Image (tube, rainbow, N blue to C red):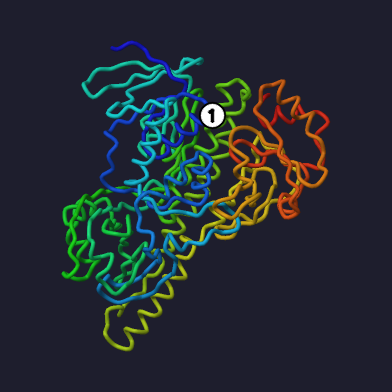
Amino acid sequence: MAATEQTEVLICGGGPIGMTLALDLAARGVRSTILEKTDGRIETPKLGLVSIRTMEIFRRLGISGYVRDTTFRRDYGLSMVYCTTIAGHFLGRIPYPSLQDEKPVPESPETKWRCSQIFLNPMLEERVKAEPLIDIRYLTKLESFQDLGSHVDVTVSLEDGEQEVLTTRYLVGCDGAGSNVRRQLEIGMTGKEQIDHSVAIFFKSAALARDHKMGDAERYYVVDESGWWGNISAMDGYELWRLTVPGTSETVADIVANADAWVRKALGSDDLPFEIISSLPWRRTELTADSYGRGRVLLAGDAAHTMSPTGGLGMNTGMGDVDNLGWKLAATLRGWGGSALLDSYVVERRPIAIRNSGASTHNYNQLKSVLDCTGIFDETPEGDAVRKRVGEAFVSATETEWETQGIHLGYRYEGSPIIVPDGTQPDEDHFRWYKPTSRPGHRAPHAWISGAPRDGVSTLDLFGHGFVLLRLGETPPDDEPLAKAARRRNVPYRAAHLSDPDIVALYEAPLVLVRPDGHVAWRGQNLPEEPDKLLDTVTGTV
């Protein structure tokens, strides 16, 4: 066995969550090592949507522009289309613009983006390999670990069969739904273990981007007399597609074996040539880990929660984990984070996973709720009436899957031990509607400070590398007592004075303390008389 090597944080899993966590830690000066048991290649894309909140996180890391530069046809329309087959009957459409025509919303400096994992992973890998504080090791498998209180010893196996021991201050399992780290911790998962078994069929067809009557769509839902049975998703807007076919544990093997026939069924024509690239069976679940770790071993992403992909919340929920965990690890490692800071990670993030996974299952059940489609293929006036009714029903039932600004921007950390409540009650946590607020626990609101949208400076650009006290108004209270306390404790801190009347009104209080992850930790009319007690709370010092 090779000699022991040391790192500050060892990340098991080199997917989007693991790589982004490493980049977040590096931005805070923390060294990490990523272990990835495969060679890093992605054979079947497992995600497509990068949410507006994830783009904000990428913006803070300086990589949102790289995401926008990844492959997806800019003028390809991103509507949702419902049909019997691509060559068959049109049933309905939820219209959405192309990437180039997507208008920014007033609540964010970013827009959501289309970026399949086959493009996102290589982009992140390039950023990771360019960062001197990150060591990424492929074909390296975590075999076992031992939490020794002051550090964790991790035994790994290499491609040639040799083993070595790595010593790390913290181990984070970002190793997916079947997490080896979670299993070794013997942490259970609660929820729905089997919603269905499905198959993802990855195929190539340039004709599907142009030679049919359904028009551009990010997703084509195909329907027969029994209801929805599959959907085709655009992976690049040119020629790469993924057909998802739900089934059972008994039928998925047959679907994989007959992938060509299933694609042909969805296309409904022999005039659209295609080539199968891969077929991957998978299980649709709604599960949340009972704990997000023990001691110096933590979980993030699918290792901590799994959910139906309906709505695109899985990877984006994991990015929220990264946003929450990265600064807490860095604070603990650098000595200014208290002993209870990392404990707040599960308190804050687990309820969000339960919320988002429940919303994802709701979206899936809505998709399956339209069952009475008898006569949908009839070439009669009665058949026309059935198709009109079914199309309207699907459009209405599935709206919750796509209108989700409240899900992505409206989550808040209620009951957190490191948030100082101010006695106000939260607005409704609505899947669609988001109301900006500086109420403690919520994401601090976006407003443009200067410059035009996309080129200017957002309030969100002020946050990320320490605590920021926003001093709002023409003559806000002095912050020196808090600044002095922060300096004495080596807590990274700065103040920012904003006097724009619109921003003052948006933030609702003259003093708003924002955490490194952009969530409000405290707000008030004046600083507390004992600023050290405020810092004790928000840094988890007990």
Q: Quadrant of the C terminus?
A: top right
Q: Closest to the observer: 435 or 341?
A: 435
- Three-letter code for the amino acid on which mark 1 is drawn: Arg
Q: Residue furthest bottom?
A: 381
**Is 448 on the left or on the right of 103, as rendered?**
right
Q: Residue at x 56, y 34 (%)?
A: 345
Residue 237 falls left or right of residue 530: left
Count numbered badges in the picture.
Answer: 1
Q: Nearer the viewer, residue 81 or 457?
A: 457
Q: Compared to 390, does 234 lie above or below? A: above
Query: From the viewer's perspective, is residue 183 above or below residue 320?
Result: above
Quadrant the N terminus occupies: top left
Q: Is residue 201 left or right of residue 34?
A: left
How crowded pointer 1 is (Cα within 10 Å; few <14, some 14-19, many 20+) is rated as some
Provide residue 218's location: percent of width, then percent of height: 37, 62
Please identify the quarter of the rendering in which residue 76 is found: bottom left
- Residue 466 percent coordinates (x, y): 62, 32
Name the residue tied to disc 1: 28
Look at the numbered disc 1 and give the secondary structure of its residue.
loop
The percent coordinates of residue 503 (x first, y second) are 71, 51
Residue shown at 31%/61% (left/top)? 232
